[in-house]
Amino acid sequence: MIDSLVTFVIGMSGGSAALAIVLFTVAVRLALLPLNVRQARTVKIRERLAPKLRELRKRYARNPERLSRETSALFAKEGSSPFAGILPMLAQLPFMWLMYRMATHPTALAGHDLFGAPLGQQVAGVIANYGLISAPVSVFLLVILLVTAVAWLSAKQIKVTEEQPELMRKIVRLLPYGSVLATLVLPLAAGLYLLVSTAWATGERAVLASRPL
C-alpha cells in the first residue's frame, strides 16, 4: 500500500520524490491552516484573559472542578475553548505517521535522491556509503543546519509565563529542537518533510501573531 501511494504521489510530481515530499507537506499545511488560525486566536485570547485566569486559579485553587467550569465559561464568552490549541497538533499526527512510514519503507524511496543524497537513508548510512567528505553528506548536513535554524527561530517565538515552573519553561523552549534530533536519526525524506513543515509553521505563526484575529 505504501509503495502504491508513493508511486502515485511521485507520479503526480513529475517523477521527483523530493518535489513530491515538498508538495505533500505544503498541501498538509494548507489543509491545517484553518485549525492553526483558530489556535493563534486561542493564544491571543489566553493572553488577553491571563489576569482573569490568574484570579480564577487563586480563587478556586482548592476546587479543581469549579476552576475547570469557570475557565471553560470564561473562554466560551470569547467563542473559544481552553483546549482549542490541541486540535492542530492532533490533526498533524496522521500525516506525520504517513510520512514516517514512507520514509522508512525499505523500497518506497529506493532510487530517489535529493541532489545525489538518497532520500531513504539516514545520515549515518550516507556517511558509511559515501564517506564523510562527499556531496550526499553535504546535502544531508545542509538540511540538518536549516532545520536547526528554523528550530531556533521557532524557539524564539515561544512565549512563557512566570507562572510556569522554571523546568517547564526550559523544556518548552527546547521542544522545537526535537525536529533536529529527528532529522539526525530519520531518513533524509523525513528530514525534508520536517524542514518544510517547521519552516512553514514558523512563518505562519509570525504572520498570524502580527494580525488581529
Image (cartoon, rainbow, N blue to C red):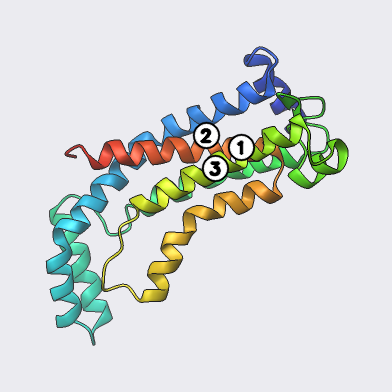
Amino acid under disc 1: Val
Position in image of residue 168 (x %, y %): 40, 71
Of labels 1 and 2, earlier in sequence is 1
- Quarter of the rendering containing residue 63: bottom left
Of 111 and 27, which appears nearest the observer?
111
Residue 147: image tag: 3
Residue 3: name its quadrant.
top right
Side of 174 where 205 appears, left or right: left
| Residue 91 is at least partly visible in this image | yes
Q: Amino acid at mark 2?
A: Val
- Marker disc for residue 196: 2
Residue lying at the far right in this picture: please name it: 129
Query: Can you give x and y, in whole percent of width and height, for residue 31 in the image?
Result: 43, 32
As measured in the structure, the alpha-carbon distance from the residue carrying label 2 to the one carrying label 3 is 9 Å
* Position of residue 91 measured from the top left corner of the image (x, y, whole percent): 47, 45
Q: State left or right for residue 182 relative to residue 161.
A: right
Foreground: 204 or 86? 204
Circles 2 and 3, Cβ within 8 Å, touching? The answer is: no
Question: Which marked residue is nearer to the observer: mark 2 or mark 3?
Answer: 3
Note whether 105 is above or below 17 in the view shown. below
